[in-house]
Image (spheres, helix red, strand yellow):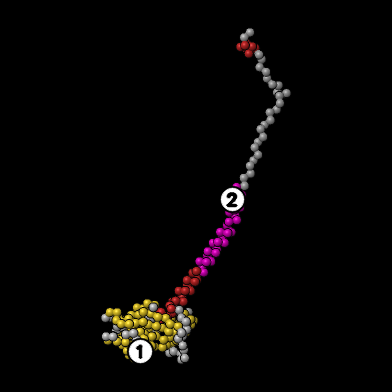
Amino acid sequence: MTDDEKKIEEPEVTQDPLTAPEEKAAPAPEPTVSHEKETIHEIRYMEKPEEKKKSNKLKIIGVLLLILLIGVVAVFATLNVTIYAPIEGATYPYTTTYNVWFPLGKAVTVGGIDMVALSTQDEMMIAVDGETEKLDVGENKLISERRAVVKTLGQTVVDTNFQIYLTYRGLSNPQTANFHLAVKTSQQVPQFIVNLLIPKEISAVPA
């Protein structure tokens, strides 16, 4: 009998279903619990109050800056200087100096005082409130003494006596005379306040 015949004759063995061991089903994988969404939600929940707090701070800062800006504009918009007769017995320890150029033959008002510069060779004639003063080149002369009261928003911020000294330096050109101008004050005054005493018609540079 050949091997092929043996294979054909051998009966196929089948397992008795009653005695066959039950096949155990593969255990289902345990479900993995993802906390990602909860974590993200928790982070977002925690960040929202911080963002809101930061936004509120920025709004408050913005409002304060706006109020400050409006206040500064109001202060400068209402700033004004009134000139009075000087208070007697004042001393003048503070000095602010300028290099200035007067237009010849034109009336200008410096610290509430009307001035007209007229040149004759090396001499300068200054008409101050109708009275004429003669200045030689290099000569330093007291031109006027007054009191200035500076107010803003109805409140007095500066109250000081002041003196104006002029030193004639010569002609810059046929239409302009150059002076050294000194403003002496009885109280310490910021320069931007002293600048209010000098009109726009005069070119002035702090010296």
Instruction: Please indicate, yes or no, whether residue 31 appears anywhere in the rendered image.
Output: yes
| Closer-to-camera residue (19/103) | 103
Q: Which residue is mark 1?
A: 129
The span shown in magenta is 36-64
| Numbered mark located on residue 31 in the image | none
Q: Residue at x 47, y 84 (%)?
A: 187
Q: Residue at x 62, y 11 (%)?
A: 3
In percent of width and height, residue 158 lies at 47, 82
**Where does the C terminus fall, quadrant-wise?**
bottom left
Membership of 44 in magenta stretch? yes
Q: Which residue is mark 2?
A: 40
Callout 2: few (<14), some (14-19), or many (20+) C-alpha neighbours within 10 Å? few
Q: Main secondary structure of the magenta part?
A: helix
Q: Residue at x 68, y 19 (%)?
A: 14
Q: Residue furthest front?
A: 138
In percent of width and height, residue 61 lies at 52, 66
Q: Is residue 34 above or below residue 116?
A: above
Q: Residue at x 36, y 79 (%)?
A: 99
Callout 1: few (<14), some (14-19), or many (20+) C-alpha neighbours within 10 Å? few
